[in-house]
Amino acid sequence: MSVLYFSLLLVMAVLAFALARGRASSGARAAAFHSRPNYHGLLAASLVAIPMLVVFVIGAILTKMIAESQALTALDPALLTDPLRRGAALREIVEVANGRFRGNPSITLQAAGDTWAYVQRVARFSIYGLGLAAGIGGLMFALRSITPDLKARNRFEWLVTVLLMICAGIAVLTTIGIVFSVVFETVRFFQKVPPMDFLTGTQWSPQTAIRADQGGSSGAFGVVPLLTGTLLISGIAMLVAGPIGLFAAIYMAEYATPRFRSTAKPVLEILAGIPTVVLGFFAALTVAPLIRGAGEYFGLSVASESALAAGLVMGMMIIPFVSSLSDDVITAVPQSLRDGSLALGGTKSETIRRVILPAALPGIVSAFMLAISRAVGETMIVVMAAGLAANLTFNPLDAVTTFTVQIKTILVGDQEFDTAKTLAAFALGFVLFFFTLTLNVIALAIIRKYREQYD
Amino acid sequence: MQNLALETVAPVVESVPVPKITAKDVNVHYGEKHAIKDVSVDIPAKGVMSFIGPSGCGKSTFLRCINRMNDTIPICRVTGDLRIDGRDIYEPGLDPVLLRARVGMVFQKPNPFPKSIYENVAYGPRLHGLASNKVEMDELVEWALRRAGLFEEVKDRLKDSGTSLSGGQQQRLCIARAISVRPEVILMDEPCSALDPIATAKIEELIDELRANFTIVIVTHSMQQAARVSQRTAFFHLGKVIEEGVTDQIFMNPRHELTRNYITGRFG
Ligand SMILES: Nc1ncnc2c1ncn2[C@@H]1O[C@H](COP(=O)(O)OP(=O)(O)OP(=O)(O)O)[C@@H](O)[C@H]1O
Ligand SMILES: [Mg+2]
């Protein structure tokens, strides 16, 4: 039904546009109009589309509310108090109403289904009727208000501003909503586990007893091993990707011939498109055994899953982020600065080191920050190559684990959502969020300081 | 204009005292485009020579040949004989980096580095190790800024960014930067095109002072400026030097009709 409604809406809007534009551009007085005909058309189209849209949205919400309450009155009121059974009953009603119920519905259920279908039918007609009326009303109003003095451009632009504001608002609200839901669950977690234990504990084993009579693991929620694991792997990754990515970018931007650049750059960007699960494969099956073999050759004991393997492969993953973005900012440094340095007798490398890199620094810093955020948030490679063991260690040859891996491990499978174990995932998510937020703030501060100095 | 011959007028031989730079049959191609055609000019030492001519005639291109800045343009090809103090600057063994330390350049658009005023001027001396300590560097920076007529205006804000200066101040900063390495030759490509009359007058004054120690080549679109600051002038047209000689002579008594038309403002 909605497809038909929106086709109608579109037709009406186009019609309004054409009519209004025609009216505003006809006659000898066309030149006297404040706004150009297109704006009159756009304003009229909005005056038709917006009321129709509002009718549809409000109608849909009301329909659902009325249909549910009407249909459920036919059923046992005891059902309504339990949300789970209420939901199940509603599903059955809808099935009956649509004739998709398997088996024979009881009389009450059949009655409820009929009520549901009836409400839907009435609602559909009302929405079409009201919508059409609103559209035609809007059209009439729009056409009647077209005069040379009508500031159609300003009004339409105001409407556009409002639309943009709504979109920005949605983006901000979603972010706030996500943060709040995480914070909320985190607070619940801290009611079960003291924050100090969580933040300073050095033991991480989130297995708690499911039943009271189960013995054994009581659960330890110390986040420190995860923090060190995350830092270790991200650190190794940045040690790989930072220099390689930056130097590759410098080569591409300053030394490579245009032909080499035009082939190498896309190839490098393909690397960014490799699914991380494939890279994880590569890490676990190729790199980890290689490191193990090498370690054994030198008489070192290497875990079969090691931070080094995960870090190296993760470094490979983020090289394109560093190199591609850095390449862009280096290329964006004006040629006149290069010329200025060369004309003073600077060599190419002196020019790069003393003029181009400082000028490109803000962009390079943000490239690095983006890469670090990617590394900290990456899960798949770590799961496959670094293991799940929460060891508190800085030895890159040991198995370690990270925030994201633990969140994933905790939440995989069927879970009760109110045990300390599952709630711990939210607390981890919160810490992770705080971590990346801090990184971003630091990056912004660096960039701003630099800009103030040199812009 | 089409019926005017493009033949060049033979230079008046006696008038170049000691040539610092000699160009003979220089040709420049940008890919297929022939931008400079058989240009031969002598540029005297310790003096100012101006290049004039209509837009697109190759003045900048030729100027950039003198410090080999055209090397940075991949499609650009320079042939012919260009010498400074008798030494071929395009000979294979010559390092263009060393050449550019001797032949400074001021660009049409001011291009200060995004560094402090002090660091802008200290950049060249640092590259070439011209100051052995902080005191010497301070002196050198002050000297260059004074010569460029900028020191009094910026002496309290040497730490501020060079890009925070006004356009005219930026151009003088670039001049200070160019003279800080004490080059023998300074090439200036329309250094006053973005400046107001007062800043222009300051820079002209500066050029007049500098010519005692430096060889200066200036590209300009202003006839008055060429007449005021230069002792010799070359008139470029469609990639050729049509006429070249003592400035007063070129302006008072041009020998070629194209030159006369150009300086009397009949075209270009
Ligand atoms: N980088 C380049 N690539 C290709 N062609 C170029 C390049 N630079 C200059 N040219 C061409 O060479 C010719 C001479 O240009 P040039 O910049 O030397 O002129 P100009 O005399 O300095 O002009 P103006 O007075 O406008 O600065 C022009 O036709 C121009 O199109
Ligand atoms: Mg030019």
Image (cartoon, coloured by chain):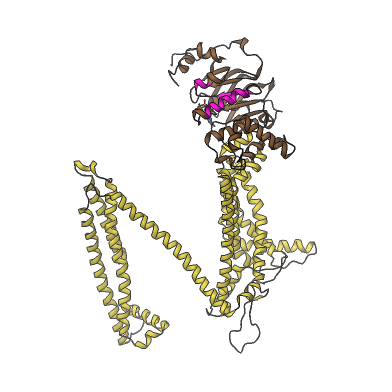
Image-quadrant location for residue B77: top right
Percent of width and height locating residue A454:
58, 45
Residue at 56% from the left image edge and 69% from the top image edge: A430
Front position in the image: A299 or A322:
A322
Residue at image point 28% right, 53% down: A43
- The image position of residue A100, as x and y in percent, is 34, 77
- Which is more toward the observer, A266 or B96? B96
Decide: is A226 above or below A444.
below
User: Is B218 covered by the magenta stretch?
Assistant: yes
Q: Which colour denotes chain B? A: brown
Residue B96 located left or right of residue A332 = right
- Residue lying at 67% horizontally and 55% vertically, measured from the top left: A240
Residue at position x 66%, y 32% in the image: B143
Q: Quick check: A325 left or right of A32? A: right
Where residue B144 appears, x then y in whole percent?
64, 32
Is there any visible trace of residue A173 in the rendered image? yes
Residue B221 percent location from the top left of the image: 50, 24
Taking the image as shown, residue A98 lies to the left or right of residue A178, namely: left
**Chain represented in yellow:** A
| Residue B238 in sight in this render | no
In the rendered image, the quadrant that contains the N terminus of chain B is: top left
Q: Quadrant of residue B20?
A: top right
Q: Is residue A175 above or below residue A46?
A: below
| Nearer the observer, A349 or B228 | B228
The segment highlighted magenta reads: B199-225
Look at the image and say whether residue B197 sits in the magenta stretch: no
